[in-house]
Image (cartoon, rainbow, N blue to C red):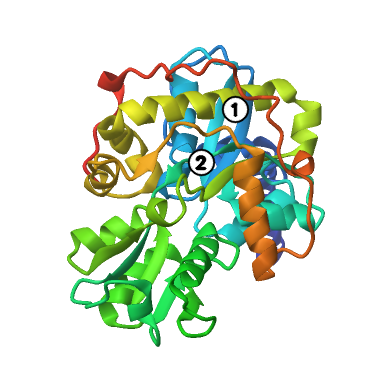
Amino acid sequence: MNKSKNNNTYIIISVVVLLVIGLGVLKFKPWKSDSKNQASTDVIHDGPNKVAKQDLTVGFLPVTCHLTCPVTDYASKTTATGTNFNSQKFSDFPTVVSALEAKQIQASFMLAPLAMKMREDGAPIKICYLGHRDGSEIVVAKNSKAKSLRDLIGKKMAIPSLYSNQNLVLHKLMEDQGVKEGQIEIVVLPPPDMPTSLASGAIDAFFVGEPNCAKAEMSGVGRILYYSKDIWPNFISCVLVVHEDLIKDKPDVVKDLVRGIAESGAWAQTHRADAAKLVAPFYRQDEKLLNFVLTKSPPIVSYTNLAPSDADLQAIQDMALKMGILKKHIPMSEIITRQFIPDHIEEAKIDVTKIPANNK
């Protein structure tokens, strides 16, 4: 009798537990992804703009040639624009390539030769705008006696990618100074690792975009041997690429994006300290480091004259073909589209008094 009573009790308890679990499942619906919460993890500034009816995620790396991406993100959420732009931070370019190929993102900043390589391989992307001009340097150890590239013969130099403009400019300098292929050991390293590798003696020099050069300068590890603008005037490192599906399906969004990037560049050109303050949380870098780069005199980065010209990109393609990085010539009409660049570029309307304070 007691045994039967106990069994009935266990059955009742089990039914109650199953009902509670079932109600919980129905309430929280775990089979559905919480896209709202997932998207919010990428948002640094979620401003008051309620006019925007659409969103677009744009990829960037925490380097100064991608600075207009987070500025456009911020501006789109603090002014009455038609599109909210969410900047998504990447740590390396191969991941950016994979994300574009899988259409996880449909717009991103990337290395100019890498964009051409993607196009050569059949990726349906087009260059719509530039990141900035100049802003890359060759850095050697603080105590190095090197005064020219020839002094680095037999040494090891790091670059960010074989498909980087830094690689192209380095080979141009090698030609100019009569340095033959193989006389300098060229290795690929993630840009954030370059200052520490220089400090440890693992490399003797590196050529990369800011703010990684400034890190070496500020820490007393390295010094500038060459500025990119002195080797290749109006140097271009990165470009804004957009998937052709987005261009075809939502040209209004692409137009809004390119306008936003252009206006953000015009604003950053004249508000350099404010730009450092604004992008620091996006980059997760010290504002002082970014301020050091952006406020140098004379300026080492420029955010004007960023409409991509055939001449600019043809020079890059010609050098990449000569080096064997690219295998075939592609007409500029298949690489570039300028249809979204505004005729008149105004500065982005950003209230600098409302930029959140942050010291790190």
Vertical position of residue 331 compared to residue 6: above or below: above
- Tell me the kind of residue under disc 1: Leu
Residue 321 quadrant: bottom right
- Tell me the kind of residue under disc 2: Gly
Q: Which residue is mark 2?
A: 131
Residue 337 quadrant: top right
- Give residue 75's mark: none
Q: Position of residue 130 (x, y in %)?
A: 55, 39
Going by the image, does 298 lie left or right of 310?
Answer: left
Q: Residue at x 70, y 44 (%)?
A: 22
Q: Secondary structure at mark 2?
A: loop
Q: Quadrant of the N terminus?
A: bottom right
Is residue 359 visible in the rendered image? The answer is: yes
- Furthest-bottom residue in this view: 154
Report the number of discs: 2
- Give residue 257's mark: 1
Is residue 46 visible in the rendered image? The answer is: no
Q: Position of residue 148 (x, y in %)?
A: 32, 72
Vertical position of residue 200 compared to residue 14: above or below: below
Q: Residue at x 29, y 41 (%)?
A: 299
Q: 272 or 229, which lies in front?
A: 229
Q: Position of residue 154 (x, y in %)?
A: 40, 87
Q: Secondary structure at mark 1?
A: helix
Q: Which comes sooner in the sequence, label 2 or label 1? A: 2
Vertical position of residue 30 compared to residue 151: above or below: above
